[in-house]
Image (cartoon, grey):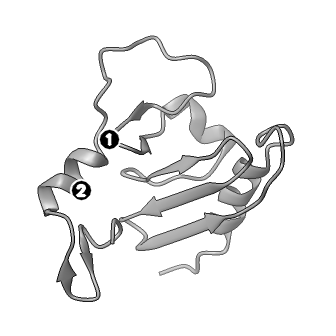
Amino acid sequence: MLLNGGELDGARVLGRKTVELMSSNQIASLTPRPAGAPAGFGFGVQVGVAAADTAAGLYSPGQFGWGGAAGTHVIIDPRERLFALLLIQHSPGSEDGIQQKFSNIVYQALASP
């Protein structure tokens, strides 16, 4: 539904503008950000990738999602029409960089246009 701008199976669940606001940075004034932190947060999702972070992983502009405390991770990428979900229970969730490794593998698997 979020990938499709608020529609699911042809039914409108959320307004297009609602999804746009959810996936836009709502905390731009809270800078500087800690190293490794997402570029910002929308309403219920982390959004954006700072240029300095691109060396650590593969991303698309406009990507948003969330990473859970025990390692769960979701990527929603409208540009690539991609939704990826990692469901694990590992504490601490990012100790071995599993979320970043997952993201990199997902993007590496995309076929060339």
Q: Measured along the vertical axis of the image, is residue 56 above or below residue 1?
A: above
Label 2 element class: helix
- Residue placed furthest toward the bottom: 9
The picture places residue 70, in percent across and down from the top left corner, at 74, 46
Image quadrant assignment for residue 112: bottom right
Left or right, residue 86 beside residue 51: right
Write down the residue under mark 2.
19
* Residue depicted at x 33% and y 65%: 2
What distance separates the C-alpha of mark 2 from that of mark 1?
9 Å
Q: Measured along the vertical axis of the image, is residue 12 above or below residue 21?
A: below
Quarter of the image that includes the N terminus:
bottom left
Image quadrant assignment for residue 81: bottom left
Residue type marked 2: Val
The picture places residue 19, in percent across and down from the top left corner, at 24, 56
The picture places residue 100, in percent across and down from the top left corner, at 71, 48
> Which of the labelled discs sits on residue 43, or is there none?
1
Residue type marked 1: Phe
Looking at this view, is 20 or 70 the one in front? 70
